[in-house]
Image (cartoon, rainbow, N blue to C red):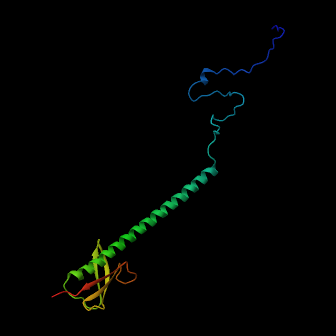
Amino acid sequence: MKRGPGIAHRRVATRPTDHPADRGPGRRPDWQPPGQSNRQSNGQSNRGFTLLEILVALAVVAVALAALVGQASRNLENTARLRDHTLAHWVAMNVVTELQVNDEWPRVGERKGSGEMAGREWFWTLKVSSTADRNIRRLDVEVHRERQRRRALATAIAYVGRPGP
């Protein structure tokens, strides 16, 4: 090849021609332009998660699930406790209401009894005491779940007047 004066010839990097079998979806040629590494276009590497990364993620998920289960358990316990206290209060108010609607004058002293509410048996203790006014008696009602009096679930204090003639 004849080279003339003033004409510089240099080699140009050419891209190897792709074979028709290498073309198509999901296929890419092995050749990459200079300056690009074997990475995706967003700069992330093609490799997956390491075992350490997976273990840390599992630990975080386990701690979060344990906290959720614990909170759900506490919510259920609180709901049951509030239900029991509400039902016990209703039992106490029923005892007071029965004494108020009856036309009998309660004697000073202590009475025990039981009543059913919401399919359960509740045990109550009624203490009747006198007041400064001879025509008024104080009623103290305690309601328990067990026959043995431990701690009252509900207490009610009420006053009843002497029935008229």
Quarter of the image that includes the C terminus: bottom left
**How far from the left and from the top, in percent, is residue 161?**
24, 86
Is residue 106 or residue 121 the one in the foreground? 106
The residue that appears at 74% across and 21% down in the rendered structure is 13
How many numbered discs, if any? 0
Q: Is residue 68 above or below residue 158?
A: above
Quadrant in the rendering for residue 39: top right
Q: Position of residue 124 (x, y in %)?
A: 31, 82
- Residue pushed farthest right? 5
Residue 55 position in % (x across, y down): 60, 53
For the point 39% across and 67% down, the residue is 79
Q: Position of residue 133 (x, y in %)?
A: 28, 91
Q: Residue at x 66, y 20 (%)?
A: 17
Q: Residue furthest front?
A: 133
106 or 91: nearer the viewer: 106
Where is 100 relative to 50, above or below? below
Residue 115, by quadrant, is: bottom left
Q: Is residue 10 left or right of residue 147?
A: right
Whether residue 2 sits left or right of residue 99 in the image: it is: right
Q: Is residue 24 above or below residue 165?
A: above
Q: Quarter holding the N terminus?
A: top right
Instruction: In the rendered view, tell whether residue 68 sits above or below residue 107.
Output: above
Seen from the viewer's position, the closer of residues 155 and 80 is 155
Identify the residue at the far left of this view: 165
